[in-house]
Image (cartoon, rainbow, N blue to C red):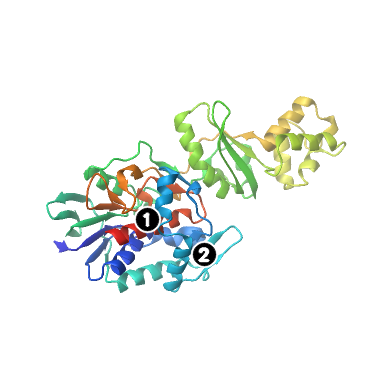
Amino acid sequence: MTEADILIIGAGAAGLMTAIIAGRTHPNRRILVLDGAAKLGAKILVAGGGRCNVTHDEVSAEAYAGSSRNAIKKVLRRFDVPETVAFFRELGVDLKREDTGKLFPVTDDAHTVLEALLQAAREVGAVIQHPARVTQVERAADGFRVSGEWGSARAPKLVLATGGRALPKSGSDGGGYELARSLGHRLTDRIFPALVPLTLPRDHFICALSGITLQAGFKVRSGAGKCLASFTNSTLCTHFGLSGPSVLDISRYYLDAKLDDPTGTRLLMNWLPEQTSDSFEAGLLAAGRVSAGRFLGRWLPERLARALCEAAGIEPTTACDQLSRPARKALVETVTALPLPITGDRGYTYAEVTAGGIPLTDIRLETMESRLCPGLYVCGEICDVDGRIGGYNFQWAWSSGYVVGVSV
């Protein structure tokens, strides 16, 4: 039985942050970090295309979903973006801002981030043991006992930083949820992939446009017609459907709304997000003898312009002033408010984060200690908090990990 003062399950972003801050705040404490992965930091290494989008220059609770934004804000402000930038600079990792507002290491290499975190954890005396998957945890009179094939460990304070279910090959395969349940914790009714590509029928015309990237807008509408969420950003047409930042951001809201109203919820796509249906139709009416395909070609690749015309049921060579009213309306809808027959999503394997988890209502926000199981702390993706693409989920990991580290 290994003895420790602080036991952390999970050596990802949140777990490492907790270990570092705990070691700095409480010197001489025995900190043991257990992780089931053979290779540490898989999520850090693949984030941002291998560059690791550490955070965003402007982070607010409005960029997150799940638990109440007021609760999320209370945690975020304990360790904000300037403090995050200073923290990494102290570790030797300078960050740079890109036009999108995303902050990356100047090296453009995620290994820089991971190695700095691991080194900082070692410097405070934290012991990181892996692969050491925890399969059982129990409350004891002297704290907590955890065990697995590797052996067992005991500590008065336990931190769950296991992640959710996204990218299961990294080790975050939902095992942390079962550990939380075994300690009497509740989980949200819904746990599903967020920031995930969406699929279309394989014979849908978008699937034949694989490789085309452009700015596009998306809206989730309820059965009553209310706009529930909207995002505009870079969009990628693929052989299976749609991906890219705009699709990843909207996916969480679409999938959630679909669970509420499977038949009424719609996802609409605007290929020309700078235009409304009315402005686009006005342009068509004023285009005269210019062909519909050529008119669309002012903004879109020829292959896409032709496909949109055909999807609307018109010949691309038809002059705009020769379009019948029904044909014009069909083209307007296809271009600016295309209903997408989404068949599903690509699942946790391709999702960047998990929606759902441990509700913040069950957590003391000033410490991130469980209200239901004293001595248990949680941070990172296992919480019911998921942010937009762009470094927001890492910021939640740094902020919540910091709060646990100073409190545990």
Q: Is residue 254 left or right of residue 165?
A: right
The residue nearer to you, when weighing 16 against 74, is 74
Label 1 neighbourhood size at 10 Å, few (<14), some (14-19), many (20+)? Answer: many
Answer few, some or many: residues within 10 Å of disc 2's Cα (few below 14, many 20 plus, some between 14 and 19): many
Q: What residue type is labelled 2?
A: Phe
Find disc 2 in the rendering and name its residue: 104
Q: Which amino acid does label 1 sit on?
A: Ser
Residue at the far right: name it. Answer: 289
Query: Helix or strand or loop: what does disc 2 sit on?
Result: strand
Q: In this view, does 175 lie to the left or right of 46?
A: left
The image position of residue 66, as x and y in percent, is: 42, 42
Instruction: Work out whether residue 267 or residue 399 is closer to the camera in this orientation and state it.
Output: 399
Query: In x, y percent, where is residue 390?
Result: 52, 55
Left of 61 or right of it: where is 340? right
**In this view, 21 is above or below 259:** below
Q: Which mark is residue 363?
A: none
Compared to 21, does 320 lie above or below? above
Query: Is the residue 248 above or below the residue 200 in the image?
Result: below
Apparent side of residue 365 relative to residue 321 in the rendered image (left or right): left
Q: How many marks?
A: 2
Q: Which residue is drawn at 75% across and 25% down?
A: 326
Residue 118 visible in the picture? yes
Looking at this view, is 35 or 200 the one in front?
A: 35
Quarter the N terminus occupies: bottom left
Secondary structure at badge 1 equals helix
Residue 280 place in picture, x, y as percent:
75, 37
Alpha carbon separation for disc pair 1 and 2: 20 Å
Say which residue label 1 marks: 400
